[in-house]
Amino acid sequence: MQNDVSRQWALLTPLVPGDMLTAQAQQVEAAGMAGVFIPEIYSDPFMGMGYCAAVTNRVQIASGIKIAFASNPFEIAMTAMDLDRLSDGRVVLGLGTSIKNWVNGFHGQPYSDTPVAQLRESIQIIREVFAKSHIPGGLQTFEGRFHNHDWRTFLGAFAPPVREKIPIWIAANQKGLTRLAGEVADGFIDHPIHGPHWAATHGRDALAEGLAKAGRDRKDIHWNCWLWVAVNNDRTEALNEARATVAFYAGMRQYQPMFAKMGFDKESMACVEAFEKGDIPGWVGAITDEMAETFVILGPPDECRKRVEEVWDVADSFCLCPPIGGLPPERVMFYIGGIAETFYA
């Protein structure tokens, strides 16, 4: 592959001291990379996005991802608008549905039986707020299937947006959301647990279906492909350290159909059942060598390059992520270093 660092994004988190996050964001910019993603795991990504925007000048700043259903779409739109102003138009709004256990359980927010339709409506509202909130009387009411808003006494945004439309990228784990990205989004964030094979087959086909339904072409959407990557000359060590990252997703019942589609129905169900019983050794132990190697790119640098090359011409940009499940910070940093040396140098 002919590596191009300008097609690379970095995943950063506010789980480190401020001076370290500053250094990381500035290193990404200095290296000529495209941008940084800040995830929403248990806390909102907007805080970390604002921090990174304040210490950089060029790189794009994206939520990777913002859980759409953990907040209302009006709040998401207004916050993204402020961030876009502060960063001089560098924000990309990455949205995803997450899973019911998180949205309904952790956040205490409603999660419908039709999350694709729920996200479609959220995006519609976000775009309307972005386009009209600064126009006197521009926003009136919205009566939808999942949301109802009454803006008739809204006096308008305190400051106009930098842009009247913000790029919205949909993060997808399964085909329904991937098709939705093809229909309505400006970008598609391919889930890292997919691995190259899913991206080059099931993901590519589902995205094409969504694009065709909306009468759009492949050039009308930016595909950002996330991949778990564990560069390590000790292949066995990389394999063992990748298991818990795969188990983190395989243990979620809502994601099980994706693993079944990839030929790991029995293994993923064993992982789900162990996780739901609190059997942590059984949960991670259900991840076979084949599963770990399917969903995590691992091994020496040349092997990792070859596997990324499988989707290099399929996607527009990449976010290569180190395995994080069950690993101490020094091991995560080891894999971050391996990614940088292999793909960013």
Image: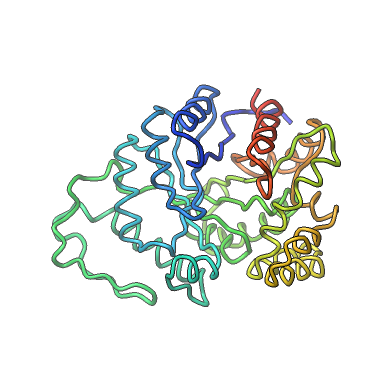
Where does residue 192 sit, x and y in percent of width and height?
65, 50
Is the residue 6 above or below the residue 114 in the image?
above
Report the front residue among 44 and 143: 44
Residue 190 lies, in percent from the top left, at: 61, 51
Q: Residue at x 68, y 28 (%)?
A: 3
Q: Nearer the viewer, residue 334 or 194?
A: 334
Quadrant in the picture for the C terminus: top right
Q: Residue at x 54, y 62 (%)?
A: 98
The N terminus appears in which quarter of the rendering?
top right
Q: Is residue 50 left or right of residue 213?
A: left
Left-right relation of 126 to 245: left
Q: Position of residue 161 (x, y in %)?
A: 26, 45
For the residue pair 135 and 46, the one nearer the viewer reads as 46
On screen, residue 237 versus residue 251, left or right, reads: right
190 vs 214: above or below? above
Going 68% across and 40% down the picture, which residue do you hit? Answer: 313
Report the coloring of the rendering.
rainbow
What number of labels is visible?
0
In the displayed structure, 1 sits above or below 96; it is above
Taking depth in this image into account, of 26 and 188 the one nearest to the observer is 26
Q: On the image, which quarter does residue 178 sit in?
A: bottom right
Percent from the top left, x then y, of residue 342?
71, 28
